[in-house]
Image: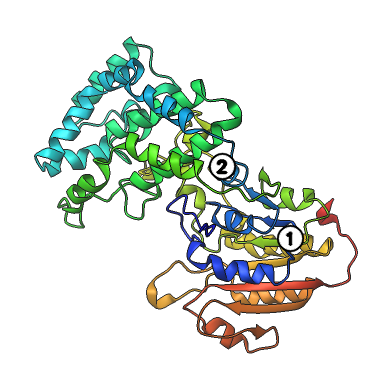
Amino acid sequence: METFGFKTLNYLGSKLRLIDFIEKNISAVASDGECVCDLFAGSGCVSYRLSQSHPIISCDIQEYSQVICEALLNPSDVTKEELNSFVQHFHSSSFQKLINVFKPLIDIEEKAIENKNLEILADVIEYGSIEVFNIEKHKSHVSSAIKKVCQALQAQKLYTKKTLITRYYGGVYFSYKQAVFIDGILELIHSKINPCKKNVFLAALLSTVSEIADTVGKHFAQPLKVRDSKGKIKTLVYSKAIKDKTVDVQLLYKNWLLKYINLQKSGFKHQTMRCDFLQCLRNLPDNVKTIYADPPYTREHYSRYYHVLETIVLRDSPQLSTVTIHGKKKISNGIYRQNRFQSPFCIKSKALGTFNELFEIASLKDRNLILSYSPYDESKKTHPRVVTIQQLLDIAQKYYRSVNVVSAGHFLHNKLNSSSRLLEASDEAEILIVCTTPQKRSVSNVVK
């Protein structure tokens, strides 16, 4: 039986394990068939679950999130015949051409894995990006192979979006062969697929990429740290290479495409938006009476964890961000995009004011606001929260007459007048701050 639980990405702070708890509390304030806004949609798991009983407006500032949410909420019909026709192109001459261009790097990496050569594998991860090499001209075990590939790219006029992912991230986040197949699949999507069906094919590729990422945590905040504090190469380099870099991308992608194609449709009309939360709130239709919000709470910007996914979707050859170490400027280890989105919720000087805007604007149109919060357990060395529960409750009370705290863990419902110490003591479970019955107020300049 369809459970409407679907993991699309390895996503920081994913709410998939709490999806029943979240749905139960949203359903308590939003009747079936009533439109709900998922304000920070991320990997789309909450939007997808709620779409079973509600029309959904999902919103996120990141392009990859909108692609995934479109594939989940408004999937185009893709037949098995269309799928089979698409994957037949994997054996085309265009794929083989890319393989041949990158063969020097593919060969050196595959031989290093076969021979358990940690020195070369470490250099592939630390120095294997062609795009970074072209800027920094560093010397390593892979420098000679990179130069040969660069010559081939130049000769065949392939310094284009057709080789974007392999040039930027090949060797670092994926094996070179995997990256070539990602580029090949991307080109097929943009050249062979009807635009109205692209989101399904792109979403399947994003899920594939998330699964094969050769990193701890399966995100893109940084490549593997290949050396310990004494400079010795970690054995993790090899074990991760065997586990991640040898996965067959073409087979995995086909399996993900089948998963998306076979998703059950909900029967409601849904909408996806790519914009910041303020723009979304200001443009929500009046029939949206409940907003679910799961903003970030730490100083860690989500765009750092998923910048590769954003580049895959945008396919825009981004400029790379730099860091200065010992007075010398270099490309960031994560190969991050310049001008990545920086959420004000993650900036201590802006967070309280931004949360105030969220509560104020949500309350003005007589909307319920359900806010997710993950308590901070200092003993577990998790990232400290930029704002506390009590600070959020103080803001909530300004704009709502009814504010309840609901925990997925060991303590029961707590009213606003309960001890703040009790609220701050919960270090085990996600909580929801459920705000209903807005205070009677006049419209302020913030919504203009």
Give the crowd class for mark 2: few <14, some 14-19, many >=20 residues within 10 Å.
Answer: many
Give the image location of residue 163, x and y in percent. 38, 24
Disc assigned to residue 269: none
Dot 1 amino acid type: Glu
- Marks 2 and 1, the one that precedes in the sequence: 2
Residue at 45%, 66% in the rendered image: 383
Disc assigned to residue 357: 1
Residue at 38%, 74% in the rendered image: 380
Disc assigned to residue 71: 2
**Quadrant in the rendering for residue 275:** top right
In contact (CB < 8 Å): disc 2 and disc 1: no
Nearer-the-camera pick, 119 or 237: 237
Nearer-the-camera pick, 118 or 312: 312
Nearer-the-camera pick, 95 or 277: 95
Helix, strand or loop under label 1: helix
Give the image location of residue 132, x and y in percent. 34, 32
